[in-house]
Image: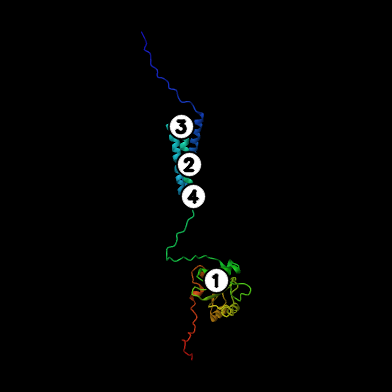
Amino acid sequence: MTVPARRTRPIRPGRRFDLRATAMFFGLAAVGLCVVGWALRMAFDVAERRPAWAVVLVLGLVLAGIVHRSGRSGLSARRLARRTTGALQEATATAMEVLEEERAPVVPAAPAPGAEEAVTVVVVDHRELSPDEFEQAIAELCVRDGCADVEVVGGAGDLGADVTATAPDGRRVVIQCKRYGDDNKVGSQDLQRFGGTCFTVHEADVAVLVTTSDFTEPATDYAAQCGILCVNEERLREWSEGLAPAPWAGVPFAEEEAAPPPGRAVR
């Protein structure tokens, strides 16, 4: 009795073990896992501070998905390397674009035609300034409030004028600056010296004495008689902060005698 021969299936030769490809695969897989771990750890923090970087995190997750999928589908190490490199390049390009957008200077929009220009108010503690700095600060207030020809002339031989300017209405403004402490008030002698030169020598239309302290009662009485404006520390602070108008704003023009018409005799 003959025994039927059993058919045997031919054994197909398997792939040869490639140590280099395997090492490259695991290396790329490790890189992908690191990217995924970094993305999960920093996602919330980056999303709160810089939402644009969330795009980079998403690309990192996509890279991890490519590594996982290629491992299951049996892609070659070379193709996997190409895909991984492409994903990394795309992530780098996106990050550079985000950085360039963040570094781009912000150009302020031009004001609409006819819109009023806002006045910038800088709060300064004038008592902390030196005498020269105090005079310069008063000059800057004059410029801010529309004066022209503003000049700091304080120093030896100034004859009482520290700042001169032309008001927006064309009147000549002469200012004397007294940087005094709280325990040293401006007295009547200071006003008398200033009153003797501000109108006759400096030809002031508006004479102002500004101090970081206050005025004595005799000084205010003399100033009222001579028409000198007194600006104490409180009034100066309001002027500096934009809470009060400039000292010369509330002073009316001096009344001048009207000239007689031509050809008419004066009786």
- Is label 4 in contact with label 1 (beta carbons under 8 Å)? no
- Is label 3 in contact with label 4 (beta carbons under 8 Å)? no
Q: Compute the Cα span from label 3 to label 4.
A: 37 Å
Task: Give whichever of 91, 213 is nearer the camera.
Answer: 91
Residue 13 position within the rendered picture, expressed as x and y whole percent measured from the top left: 44, 23
Q: Which mark is residue 76?
A: 3
Badge 2 marks a residue whose secondary structure is helix
- Is label 1 in contact with label 3 (beta carbons under 8 Å)? no
- Is label 1 in contact with label 2 (beta carbons under 8 Å)? no
Using a 10 Å C-alpha cutoff, classify the residue at mark 2 as few (fewer than 14 neighbours), some (14 to 19) or many (20 or more).
few
Q: Which mark is residue 150?
A: 1
* Residue, disc 4: 100
Residue 66 visible? The answer is yes
Type of amino acid at the residue the image marks with label 2: Gln
Task: Report the side of 193 relative to 59 (left or right).
Answer: right
Q: Quadrant of the N terminus?
A: top left
Of label 1 and label 3, which has the lower sequence position? 3
* Residue, disc 2: 89
Of label 4 and label 1, which has the lower sequence position? 4
Of all residues shown, which one is farthest toward the bottom?
267
Of label 3 and label 4, which has the lower sequence position? 3
Type of amino acid at the residue the image marks with label 3: Ser
Type of amino acid at the residue the image marks with label 1: Val
